[in-house]
Amino acid sequence: MQIHLEQTPVESLECDALIAVTFEGKPNDRFKDSLSDVYGSGEVAGKIFEMTLVHHPQGFKARRLLLAGAGPAEKFTSAELRRVSGAALRHLKSRSLRNIGIWLEGSCGGPEHVQAAVEGAVLGDYEPDRYKSDKKDVKVVDHFTVAAPGGGAALNQAAERGRVIGEAQNSARELSTEPANKLTPTSMAESARQTAAAYGLECEVLDQDRMRQLGMGSLLGVAQGSAEPPALIVLRYRPANAKGAAHLGLVGKGVTFDTGGISIKPADGMEKMKYDMSGGAAMIGTMRALAQLKPPIPVTALIPAVENMPGSRAQRPGDIVTSLSGKTIEVINTDAEGRLILADALTYARRLGCTHLVDAATLTGAIVVALGHVNTGAFGTDDRLVERVLEAAHAAGEKMWRMPLDDDYKEQLKSPFADMANVGGRPGGSITAALFLNEFAEKTPWVHLDIAGTAWLDEAKPYMSKGPVGVGVRTFVSLAMNWSD
């Protein structure tokens, strides 16, 4: 889909359909006279995601006008515009319209709104249908145009940012859609190599022998039950003129399929466990965007990629492993594998010189119990870094909620046989998982994001297809781009 910014009068914009945002209880001033019969009938209420399509609007070259409901004007933000833009594009795309525009002006015509509108359209355009053989009814949008009065360099840059970030988030979604027979740790590493080659990043992949030499017993223990070898993917972005001493480390869980191992999961819903690498996919997508947008600080992404299988050599409950940090871990539950691979990746990130760490993982079912599928759970010991991440998430329109991380919960991780256990029981399960990871971040400022409830949509939304979301990409891009020491 081609993205354009148009500065000519909106009346002269030629397209199959022009999207106009309309608010609840407030007719769009530009159309209240020419569409008085439509508004008078009560057909247009302006409620969120309400779509009213008008053919041959008077005074416009656009062949159709879509009045896209955006809810109450006082609650409207760029985050709402992102969703409305995606919903409107999907509505029009379903009608086989290929050349679509959106009209932004006044209070919703600034750079942040242009960026959000483009991101929403790019995200709304994505469909997880790669493996469908019947392509006869596939609908395609060729052009998406943002009509913004005045234009200028700032709006052009905003449109380009929106395209880059939206496409990067879609690349994370595409990776998370891949079935486990196609996406193994090895092929995930190859995808990272291809991304690095295409966008000018550095890429290093540690294989099983190298990890064994280093002493990554926690990561290797998870991988030992699978015929597929593990990989530790390292992607590096180095700015030409780095500002300050900060070095951001992004660590993403990359379990390409999670059966639970010997502590095997129920069969119902296990097919979704291909998305257990969504944190890692988000990091690869983020690095793709950062390579193009060029933040002022160095960023290193680490993705420990494994497959968790119940083979004859699989890790057993009761096994004790020695992590890269030297800490020993009693494996009580082999289905708590994400924290085991992240432990060694966090330690390695610190060895690479990362001064600030953020990890993202589909880590616990407990976070879904606590926050449902709306907010990502955020944990951290460094208040300033937590604030930075939450501010970045708010700016990017991704909902996150800070969770407690009291030392009192550490009692649940005690083991009589090793330095710690990998689980602490059902109470506060997402908290004890985060505290486990904190042992390996040590004193480095660190934030953990549990995305188990927000990385996947079980049902399509008006603005996004069913399946992987690519959650975290926009937040991590915002964090790096706006970093200041």
Image (cartoon, helix red, strand yellow):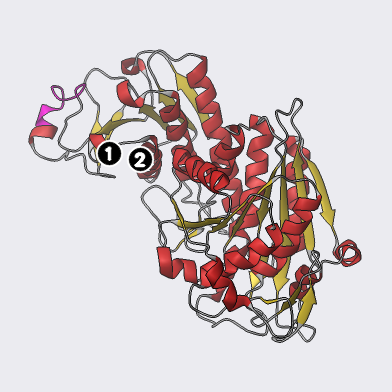
Q: Is residue 177 magenta?
A: no
Q: Are marks 2 and 1 in contact (CB under 8 Å)?
A: yes
Q: Which residue is mark 1?
A: 75
Where residue 140 appears, as percent x and y from the top left, is 48, 41
Residue 308 locus on image (x, y percent): 69, 74
Upstream in the sequence, badge 2 or badge 1?
1
> Residue drawn at (70%, 78%), measured in percent from left and top?
309
Quadrant in the rendering for residue 310 = bottom right
| x and y, in percent, of residue 347 in the image | 76, 58
Q: From which residue to which does the magenta span run?
A: 29-37
**Closer to the eye: label 2 or 1:** 1
Residue shown at 15% from the left, 25% from the top: 32
Taking the magenta stretch, the answer to whether it contains residue 32 is yes
- Cα–Cα gap, marks 2 and 1: 8 Å
Q: Which residue is denoted by mark 2 in the rendering?
A: 80
Q: Is residue 82 left or right of residue 178?
A: left
